């Protein structure tokens, strides 16, 4: 799109510090996403490795005993199965627990047996674990790569912003470029703006984020595809453009140089008043980072609320048959579910077991 001429001195110019900002979400999203990836890897990888070893030389034990077997399906496709395996082999007794997770659209019960490694009889699993082995390997790999990749991508973007800000410390030639303003948010005297340079560079369309102090506004030069177009400058060969403010205070200019540079962006009104061509604010949109913060914050509130209700249910409830306490306890990971059932059993062990703590006979405690 045609740009108004930006008249700048024919020399290298400096820019104000920290004109490219790092979104606050980068600081907390990276460790949270990375923690989920590590947690998933620590939780599932040992079982997958164990079952892969067993699959190299499997031995089905007809006299093996699969106890307390239970499968739980979440979100209609994520299935988690756990069981206690008790068996004897070559005069040695073994007792172990297994837990497997896979993606399946199956509804109903699963049939399974006990399989050990003929080379290492201490390694045992359910035959279901071997049937779903590649399903589990692919599921674990995809989720770890996805979560790990997201955290690394955010880290890379943060490092790129740091590198750009470091380059901006040195004066350089400034090249005007149009940028598309995709979102902004006013809060506590700051105007936070997200923009990208896809107008000038369709191939990369890199996004950047900046904050302007109270009273500063971005230099708006037009509109494209229903979004405001701002004027930015590319500092030398830096990867991200710098969005300019309407008064060009972000560029190290003298007052005369700044006045001359602003001439093409002013127009005459009654009373010979020169007004910057920034009369319309961009259409306000919600930043993706704000949406992410709201989503994660809401999710954390729900998790904390459910966890608190579960603690109250297993430690203080006046009855073991309390919904949704029973349902939450049933959905807890095996260690937490076992602990919760133990707390309930201490108080209601003489009565019938509730859902989530019931054995195969649907009456006694598991």
Image (spheres, rainbow, N blue to C red):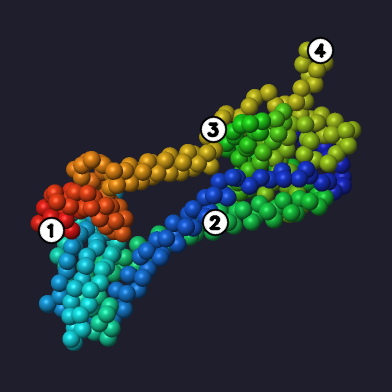
Q: Position of residue 284 (x, y in %)?
A: 56, 30
Residue ID for mark 2: 153
Left of 148 or right of it: where is 235? right
Q: CA distance from mark 1 to mark 4?
A: 89 Å
Q: CA distance from mark 1 to mark 2?
A: 47 Å
Q: Which mark is residue 271?
A: 4
Q: Is residue 23 above or below residue 273?
A: below
The residue shown at (49%, 42%) is 292
In terms of image quadrants, where is residue 52? bottom left
The quarter of the image holding the C terminus is bottom left
Q: Position of residue 46 (x, y in %)?
A: 36, 70
Query: Secondary structure under badge 1?
Result: loop
The residue shown at (75%, 54%) is 167
- Mark 3 or 2 closer to N-term? 2
Q: Residues within 10 Å of mark 4 (few under 14, many from 20)?
A: few
- Mark 2 or 4 closer to N-term? 2
Residue ID for mark 3: 285
């Amino acid at each position: 799109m045609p740009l108004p001429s930006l008249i700048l001195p024919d020399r290298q110019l400096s820019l104000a510090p920290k004109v490219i900002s790092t979104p606050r979400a980068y600081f907390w999203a990276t460790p949270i996403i990375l923690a989920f990836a590590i947690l998933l890897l620590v939780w599932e990888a040992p079982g997958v490795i164990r079952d892969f070893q067993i699959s190299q030389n499997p031995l089905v034990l007809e006299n093996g005993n699969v106890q307390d077997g239970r499968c739980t399906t979440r979100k209609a496709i994520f299935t988690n199965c756990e069981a206690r395996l008790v068996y004897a082999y070559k005069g040695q007794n073994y007792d172990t627990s297994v837990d497997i997770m896979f993606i399946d659209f199956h509804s109903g019960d699963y049939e399974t047996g006990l399989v050990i490694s003929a080379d290492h009889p201490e390694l045992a699993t359910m035959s279901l674990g071997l049937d779903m082995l590649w399903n589990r390997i692919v599921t674990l790999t995809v989720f770890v790569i996805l979560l790990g990749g997201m955290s690394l991508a955010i880290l890379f973007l943060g490092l790129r912003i740091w590198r750009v800000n470091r380059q901006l410390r040195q004066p350089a030639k400034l090249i005007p470029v149009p940028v598309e303003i995709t979102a902004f948010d006013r809060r506590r005297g700051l105007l936070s703006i997200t923009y990208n340079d896809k107008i000038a560079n369709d191939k990369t369309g890199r996004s950047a984020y900046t904050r302007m102090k109270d009273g500063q506004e971005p230099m708006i030069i037009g509109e494209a595809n229903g979004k405001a177009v701002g004027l930015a400058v590319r500092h030398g060969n830096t990867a991200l453009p710098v969005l300019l403010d309407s008064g060009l205070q972000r560029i190290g200019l003298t007052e005369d140089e700044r006045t001359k540079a602003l001439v093409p962006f002013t127009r005459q009104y009654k009373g010979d008043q020169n007004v910057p061509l920034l009369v319309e604010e961009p259409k306000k949109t919600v930043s993706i980072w704000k949406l992410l913060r709201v989503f994660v914050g809401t999710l954390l509130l729900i998790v904390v609320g459910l966890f608190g209700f579960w603690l109250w249910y297993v430690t203080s409830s006046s009855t073991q048959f309390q919904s949704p306490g029973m349902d939450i306890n049933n959905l807890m990971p095996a260690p937490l579910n076992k602990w919760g059932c133990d707390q309930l059993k201490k108080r209601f062990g003489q009565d019938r077991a509730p859902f989530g703590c019931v054995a195969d006979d649907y009456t006694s405690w598991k």
